[in-house]
Amino acid sequence: MAYKYRYDFLRTWMKANGKTRKEILNAIGTQDYKTCYKWINGTTSMPIGYMIDFCTYFDVDVLEFFEKDGLPLSEILEKKNKTNESDMKSNEKWMQKVIETQSRQIDMLGQIVQRFQLENKK
């Protein structure tokens, strides 16, 4: 049950959304085509800072870059966090659930970043 970087995500996303390397590089604020080529072809992972820039620019959930047991983390969290809205007694309870969900996602991303940092130090 290890978290893994999805080396095929960027390439798959680019094909599905008709984006070019130039558009990706402009979004993250760099012009390094050689490194971008490595990210797209799965030779190396995109650094977290660039991931966040990419996700912010293109409105992509950063958890899409990671998987656990072969499933994207965003999909796993979606399944875990599904709630029956008819059971919510008020907007306040619903909003609290949203805040808790986002907090869990932020915590999970923090754990992933720490693991990647530890792995990259080795």
Image: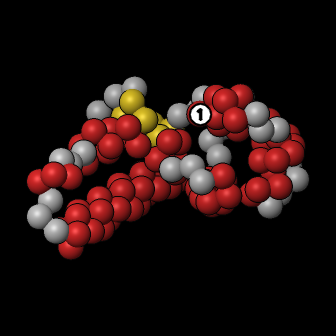
Please, which residue is most extreme toward the bottom here? 92
Q: x, y percentage for residue 24?
A: 77, 47
**Figure quadrant of residue 1:** top left
Q: Does 68 sit left or right of 117 as displayed?
A: left
Where in the figure is residue 66, as x and y percent of width and height?
47, 40
Q: Is residue 10 left or right of residue 62?
A: right
Q: Which residue is mark 1?
A: 9
Q: Is residue 111 visible?
A: no
Nearer to me, 93 or 24: 93
| Left or right side of 93 for 98 | right
Residue depicted at 86% across the width and 45% down the height: 22
Report whether residue 74 is seen.
yes
Q: Observer-nearest residue: 62 or 68?
A: 62
In the displayed structure, would residue 39 be above or below residue 8?
A: below
* Residue 19 x/y as whole percent: 77, 38
Q: Residue at x 51, y 50 (%)?
A: 61
| Left or right of 117, for residue 44 | right
Residue at 39 percent across and 30 percent down: it is 71
Q: Residue at x 53, y 42 (%)?
A: 65
Vertical placement of residue 86 versus 12, above or below: below
Task: Name which residue type carries label 1.
Answer: Phe
Q: Position of residue 25 (x, y in %)?
A: 81, 51
Q: What is the basis of the colouring in this image?
A: secondary structure
Secondary structure beneath dot 1 equals helix
Total numbered labels placed on residues in the image: 1
User: Mark 1: few, some, or many residues within 10 Å (few <14, many ≥20)?
Assistant: some
Q: Is residue 106 above or below residue 69?
A: below
Residue 73: name its quadrant: top left
